[in-house]
């Protein structure tokens, strides 16, 4: 092959990211015909004299808002969308506020208060277009008194460090918030609500994405307490959180609304971007480049190192036997794994995946592996992920770096930084979880 495997693997990854560009996703699902808004299969007449409010939260919120303004034009009255720092996009009528992610901060609390204040203006004649994408839960913190932001930051950090999945984390968040778990729909009532959603959660459960602010909540205060107990966090969590959840279980605080609640009768939730869409686009590009393709799964979860080991084992099998698929081959998978932090290093789940996979394919020629966050961010780093091949472990040794030791210390970032193998995309302004691309060449070429 004339191109290098590394050029191809990055090209395939970026094709997947481009397919879930937020503006493109909005425009493919939202159209205006006269005074009727077409949202997917739904027809929504816009009421004369009624107004359209645009609200939301997430890393993709700004370009989504820009696309809504473009489509609805003069119908848009006002809006407020909260995004992660640096994830800006030009808009006209919608105010874009920046806040902290993955840990919520005071700017997010202020933004949530302003959003609630804006929703107080709505009437039954109005339409609220809510834009949700990855990061929305952290970016829209509205602690239920007496819980404070510091309390929520503490319990979120504990859950992240303990390896809790996003569904578990969001269950706890919902029961400490005024907006999550259907709270935004309750605040917007009696206005109609149309929510456009870019999914960053495996399986695309609407009640989990951004903690389901416009979706009925199937979880309870008791569930939230059980999750803290599962990870041995009951005694480590702030007293206010234990007290609030316990009182909620005892009926002293209102439970989050369920899907049958009347407030959802005027709510439409529409999924406009998913990990599967990104994988399909990546697959099309890989085929155009001459690779046989195999989509392993769009729902990979569990411990990152275990997932990496499984991917590496399959890569070795194909490289040495051309089974179960022939070479040249492109393996694709998506989803979101978790890292149970045991070390003190720097990295993220994608960098950890690639480092573990590099150990698994050590010495295997003609192979390359990439794993990256479609949002351009991997953990608390400026990298989306990393790229490795069969020579990575050996190259690390030549500069005095033991790949296994760095993996055990959750310290993938400095190793890949030293080797020049970090995947740096900058903020992509979208987020549909992670995308992994593995290429296996036809005849062991230079990778």
Image (spheres, rainbow, N blue to C red):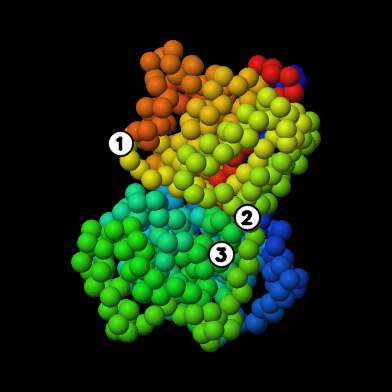
Return the x and y of residue 81 as percentages of the image width and height. 48, 61
Return the x and y of residue 321 as percentages of the image width and height. 71, 27
Name above or below for residue 133 compared with residue 270. Answer: above
Q: Which residue in the protein does label 2 denote? A: 274
Element at label 2: loop
Residue lying farthest to the top in this orientation: 398
Element at label 1: loop
Return the x and y of residue 418 as percentages of the image width and height. 43, 21
Verify CB contact (< 8 Å) between mark 1 and mark 3: no
Say left or right for 389 vs 27.
left
Name above or below for residue 212 compared with residue 58. Answer: below
**Circle 2 or circle 1, nearest the eye:** 1
The image quarter in which residue 29 lies: bottom right
Say left or right for 320 vs 144.
right
In the depicted view, which residue is nearer to us: 208 or 116?
Answer: 208
Residue at (53%, 87%) from the top-left corner? 262
Q: CA distance from mark 1 to mark 3?
A: 33 Å
Q: Which residue in the protein does label 3 denote? A: 205
Element at label 3: loop
The image quarter in which residue 265 lies: bottom right
Whichever of labels 2 and 3 marks the residue nearer the N terminus, that label is 3
Q: Which residue in the protein does label 1 denote? A: 344
Say left or right for 34 vs 26.
right
In the depicted view, which residue is nearer to us: 327 or 106?
Answer: 327
Q: CA distance from mark 2 to mark 1?
A: 33 Å
Verify CB contact (< 8 Å) between mark 2 and mark 1: no
Residue at (60%, 70%) from the top-left corner? 269
Name above or below for residue 302 compared with residue 411. Answer: below
- Crowding at mark 3 (Cα within 10 Å: few <14, some 14-19, many 20+): some
Q: CA distance from mark 2 to mark 3?
A: 11 Å
């Amino acid at each position: 092959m004339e191109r290098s495997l590394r050029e191809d693997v990055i090209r395939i990854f970026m094709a997947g990211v481009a397919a879930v560009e937020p503006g493109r996703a909005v425009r493919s699902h939202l159209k205006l015909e006269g005074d009727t808004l077409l949202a997917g299969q739904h027809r929504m007449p816009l009421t004369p004299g009624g107004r359209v409010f645009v609200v939301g939260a997430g890393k993709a919120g700004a370009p989504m808002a820009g696309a809504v303004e473009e489509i609805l034009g003069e119908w848009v009255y006002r809006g407020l969308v909260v995004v992660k720092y640096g994830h800006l996009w030009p808009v006209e009528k919608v105010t874009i506020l920046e806040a902290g992610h993955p840990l919520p901060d005071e700017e997010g609390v202020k933004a949530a208060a302003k959003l609630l204040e804006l929703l107080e203006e709505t009437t039954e004649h109005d339409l609220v277009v809510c834009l949700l994408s990855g990061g929305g839960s952290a970016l829209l913190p509205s602690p239920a008194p007496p819980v404070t932001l510091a309390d929520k930051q503490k319990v979120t950090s504990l859950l992240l460090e303990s390896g809790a999945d996003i569904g578990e984390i969001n269950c706890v968040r919902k029961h400490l918030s005024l907006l999550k778990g259907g709270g935004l729909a309750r605040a917007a009532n009696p206005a109609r609500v149309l929510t456009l959603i870019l999914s960053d959660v495996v399986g695309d459960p609407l009640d989990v994405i951004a903690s389901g602010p416009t979706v009925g909540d199937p979880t309870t205060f008791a569930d939230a307490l059980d999750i803290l107990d599962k990870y041995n966090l009951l005694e480590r969590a702030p007293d206010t959180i234990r007290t609030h959840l316990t009182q909620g279980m005892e009926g002293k605080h209102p439970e989050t609304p369920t899907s049958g609640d009347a407030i959802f009768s005027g709510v439409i939730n529409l999924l406009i971007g998913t990990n599967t869409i990104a994988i399909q686009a990546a697959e099309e590009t890989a085929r155009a480049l001459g690779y046989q393709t195999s989509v392993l799964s769009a729902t990979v979860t569990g411990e990152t190192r275990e997932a990496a080991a499984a991917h590496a084992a399959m890569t070795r099998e194909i490289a040495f036997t051309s089974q179960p698929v022939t070479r040249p081959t492109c393996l694709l998978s998506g989803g979101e794994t978790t890292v149970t932090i045991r070390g003190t290093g720097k990295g993220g789940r994608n960098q950890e995946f690639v480092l573990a996979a590099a150990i698994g394919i050590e010495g295997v020629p003609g192979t390359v592996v990439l794993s990256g966050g479609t949002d351009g961010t991997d953990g608390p780093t400026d990298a989306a992920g990393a790229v490795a091949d069969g020579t990575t472990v050996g190259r690390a040794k030549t500069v005095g770096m033991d790949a296994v030791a760095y993996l055990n210390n959750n310290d993938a970032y400095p190793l890949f930084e030293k080797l020049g193998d970090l995947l740096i995309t900058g903020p992509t302004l979208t987020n549909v979880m992670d995308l992994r691309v593995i290429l296996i060449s036809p005849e062991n070429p230079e990778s």
